[in-house]
Image (cartoon, rainbow, N blue to C red):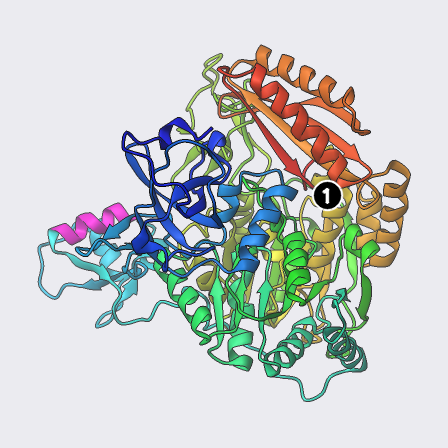
């Protein structure tokens, strides 16, 4: 039967009318299948498989993708397509890729097609006077930063306003954000001063906005490659000629020159007239790598990530389709970029969990890249200093065993924090930072928690400031001072007295990146502090600006969350440190040791990359932990071989496949019952799988949650068991406020 909303109160079309099988880009599960629409005679020549078309859906007009053309698959009256959208058709390979993503990750097809449609296709459409339809891509450029200038003659300022004006250089401009930091003021104050005519506050029209970080310093090309690099390039060039090309693991110690190997591989592919995609785990890594690729490969290199505006992505899309660009650098969504004649995909820092999407469709860009490359006959290079056990086990290893400049990695010192005094900075780290300051060098410090203090509690009665919607403590932030939840965004003021007992004995507990920044101001006041975390990088282009600020000459500290460990190649870094390094070991996840190990090794790799005399310090409360000890020796092979043995024993990836089912709802009792019923259905089904859980998760945004882990020998077994059970439970639970999400190959368990 045709869906009732598609029936028209008009005579049916004549038998034999050509139909388009259209997948509508809507989220309704009941419509997650191709629907039949008649192709009007005037559109027969214009509509083909892959075309974007405008279709009636009840009173609405929605965009759909034509996935087939032929005779109707339903009986009854059918309505006609309203028009074809004047936009490029989706290539066959990208449609097939979207269909595979939907099947592999048990996701709605519409959500996967959205990954490959031209930018703006789901936004507002415009209908011209002649009845044709086009995408209404916004033409606005990115917002420019605000700058402040002095006013020659203005009203009399107050004392505080005069102090702010004094911080503005005479005869030139200063960035408003910089003035706020320098003068200890706020944007609201600057706006009020501008309204009074004391200053001008305008968009910066003089300084080009380097939102992609093309101004990052680029190291010169090496005069010659070392033997490991040459051998790696030889193997890669050989692999490019194999059918199908294999996936290769480029395993190189930090500073071993993996990027130089990528550049030679990219040049080889381009000489063959083919295109390439270079993936980085986060947008924060795009600036420096993009700068290096542009400097060596020219303007044919483009950037692609979700933080770009629709207009910017549309421009890149057009350049790729026109052949004006053939290399794309970006985060996980760049794996779907319309690169023609694809010959190579590079996945840099392949160990990073950020390649896994945490919303529907929950795809893993590393797996999608392998699938896309197989369809295109392209090679995939997985590059990292700390491979995942899955990649280590599955792929051929191409090794870069030494640093490119011949220098030795710095030694790692583990500091037992049980022997140290109060405060986040140990005595050895404080001494190393002061030495770096005296020599004019730089440091990179990682503390994988943001905020000023991790909790606010009462010493008298034990009251703890908690989020009213989530089962977590509130984190204290500065500038302005507030308590906030990092999960739902709830914010409140810091109480002067305990709300429970009225005591004034409130204290802060734990330290985040803002608290560390405060401590460092006192410890090394002469070092410039650059904080890189989710709070400081919220605005567009801020990552590139912060990294450029850190790269300026002079002593400086780059501190922040795991962002600071991800691939930055910066000179003069002689101190690297991980604070509270073993915190991740407290999470009940079989990948916890792997993550801690990766963070330590990657952070250590930021130091001494130009042969500088350097030191790496790891602060831990459990210094004897296996991950800490092996990471301190940079014993990657030993750690991975141990992980492989452990996972083989327990049949965990790569020796088994996992599917996680998340259940959440407003009624905790219902959630518990549904989760139990679902686990029983999966365990007692016809597919041989192992069921773990349901396990309780902390309440989030007012909703109770449970998780079930399904393990199967093959991914199809685990997925099939979960999908069948969820479908059955969904029918029984219809009308209840219950959500069930299937996550194939989860990165968090």
Q: Nearer the viewer, residue 347 or 546?
A: 347
Q: Quadrant of the C terminus?
A: top right
Q: Is residue 207 above or below residue 64?
A: below
Sort mark 1 into few (<14), some (14-19) or many (20+) by Cα contacts within 10 Å: some
Instruction: Assign the magenta stretch its main secondary structure.
Output: helix
The residue lying toward the viewer, choosing from 241 and 453, is: 241
Q: Which residues are magenta?
A: 186-195
Vertical placement of 415 versus 622: above or below?
Answer: below
Q: Is residue 133 left or right of residue 501?
A: left
- Percent position of residue 477, x then y: 46, 38
Which residue is nearer to you in this view: 167 or 223?
Answer: 223
| Res. 183 image quadrant | bottom left
How far across and down, in percent of the image, does residue 14 sit? Answer: 35, 41
Q: Residue at x 46, y 46 (%)?
A: 535
> On the image, numbered disc 1 is attached to which residue?
420
Q: Magenta stretch: residue 187 in it?
A: yes
In terms of image quadrants, where is residue 148? bottom left
Which residue is more in the foreground, 468 or 377? 377
Q: Is 313 on the left or on the right of 188, as rendered?
A: right
Q: Is residue 147 magenta?
A: no
User: Which residue is drawn at the image coordinates 43% and 64% (left, top)?
Assistant: 317
Circle 1 SS class: loop
In the image, farthest residue toward the bottom: 223
Report whether residue 523 is seen. no
Q: Position of residue 361 (x, y in %)?
A: 55, 42
Is 221 placed above or below 244 here? below
**Residue at the spot x=70%, y=35% of the render?**
719
Say left or right for 391 vs 77: right
Residue at the far front in the pictured view? 15
Q: Is residue 232 visible?
A: yes
Task: Give x and y (percent) for residue 121.
Answer: 37, 52
């Amino acid at each position: 039967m045709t869906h009732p909303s598609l029936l028209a109160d008009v005579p049916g079309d004549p038998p034999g009318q050509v139909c388009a099988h259209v997948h509508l880009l809507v989220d309704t599960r009941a419509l997650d299948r191709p629907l039949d629409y008649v192709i009007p005679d005037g559109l027969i020549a214009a509509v083909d498989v892959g075309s974007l078309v405008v279709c009636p859906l009840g009173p609405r007009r929605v965009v759909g993708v034509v996935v087939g053309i032929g005779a109707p698959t339903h009986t009854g009256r059918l309505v006609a397509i309203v028009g074809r959208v004047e936009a490029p058709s989706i290539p066959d390979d990208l449609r097939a890729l979207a269909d595979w993503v939907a099947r592999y990750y048990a996701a709605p097809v519409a959500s996967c097609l959205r990954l490959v449609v031209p930018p703006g296709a789901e936004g507002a459409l415009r209908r011209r006077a002649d009845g044709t339809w086009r995408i209404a891509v916004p033409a606005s450029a990115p917002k420019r930063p605000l700058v402040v200038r002095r006013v020659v003659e203005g009203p009399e300022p107050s004392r505080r306003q005069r102090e702010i004006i004094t911080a503005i250089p005479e005869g030139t401009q200063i960035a408003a954000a910089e003035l706020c930091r320098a003068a200890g003021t706020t944007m609201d104050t600057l706006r009020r001063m501008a309204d009074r005519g004391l200053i001008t506050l305008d968009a910066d029209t003089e300084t080009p906005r380097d939102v992609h970080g093309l101004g990052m310093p680029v190291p010169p090309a090496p005069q010659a490659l070392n033997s490991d690099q040459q051998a790696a390039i030889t193997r890669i060039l050989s692999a490019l000629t194999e059918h199908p090309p294999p996936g290769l693991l480029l395993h190189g110690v930090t500073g071993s020159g993996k990027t130089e190997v990528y550049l030679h591989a990219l040049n080889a592919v381009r000489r063959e007239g083919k295109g390439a995609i270079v993936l980085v785990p986060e947008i924060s890594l795009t600036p420096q790598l993009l700068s290096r690729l542009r400097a060596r490969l020219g303007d044919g290199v483009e950037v692609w990530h979700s933080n770009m505006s629709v207009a910017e992505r549309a421009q890149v899309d057009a350049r790729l389709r026109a052949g004006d660009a053939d290399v794309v650098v970006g985060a996980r969504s760049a794996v779907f970029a319309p690169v023609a004649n694809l010959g190579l995909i590079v996945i840099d820092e392949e160990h990073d969990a950020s390649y896994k999407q945490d919303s529907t469709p929950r795809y893993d860009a590393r797996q999608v890249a392998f699938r896309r490359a197989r369809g295109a006959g392209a090679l995939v290079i997985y590059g990292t200093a700390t491979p995942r056990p899955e990649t280590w086990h599955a792929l051929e290893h191409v090794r870069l065993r030494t640093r490119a400049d011949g220098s030795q990695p710095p030694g790692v010192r583990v500091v037992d924090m049980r022997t140290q005094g109060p405060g986040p900075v140990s005595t050895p780290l404080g001494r190393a930072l002061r030495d770096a300051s005296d020599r004019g060098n730089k440091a990179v410090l990682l503390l994988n928690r943001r905020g000023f203090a991790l909790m606010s509690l009462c010493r008298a009665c034990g009251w703890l400031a908690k989020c009213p919607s989530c089962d977590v403590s509130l984190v204290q932030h500065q500038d302005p001072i507030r308590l906030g939840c990092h999960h739902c965004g709830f914010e409140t003021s810091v109480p002067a007295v305990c709300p429970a007992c009225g005591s004034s004995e409130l204290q802060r507990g734990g330290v985040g990146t803002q608290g560390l920044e405060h401590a460092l101001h006192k410890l090394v006041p002469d070092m410039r502090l650059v904080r890189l975390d989710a709070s400081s990088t919220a605005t567009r282009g801020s990552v590139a600006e912060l990294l450029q600020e850190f790269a300026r000459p002079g002593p400086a500290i780059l501190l922040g969350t795991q962002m600071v460990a991800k691939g930055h190649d910066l000179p003069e870094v002689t101190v690297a440190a991980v604070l509270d390094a073993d915190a991740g070991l407290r999470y009940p996840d079989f990948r916890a040791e792997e993550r801690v190990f990766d963070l330590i090794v990657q952070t250590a790799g930021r130091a001494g990359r130009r042969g500088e005399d350097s030191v790496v310090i790891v602060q831990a409360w459990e210094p004897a932990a296996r991950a800490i000890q092996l990471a301190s020796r940079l014993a990657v092979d030993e750690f991975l071989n141990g992980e492989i043995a452990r996972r083989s024993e327990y049949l965990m990836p790569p020796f088994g496949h996992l599917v996680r089912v998340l259940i959440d709802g407003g009624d905790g009792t219902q959630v518990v019952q549904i989760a139990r019923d679902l686990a029983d259905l999966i365990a007692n089904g016809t597919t041989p799988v192992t069921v773990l859980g349901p396990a309780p998760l902390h309440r989030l945004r007012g909703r109770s949650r449970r998780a079930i882990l399904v393990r199967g020998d093959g991914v199809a077994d685990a997925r099939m068991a979960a999908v069948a059970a969820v479908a059955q439970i969904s029918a029984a639970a219809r009308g209840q406020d219950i959500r069930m999400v299937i996550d194939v190959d989860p990165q968090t368990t």
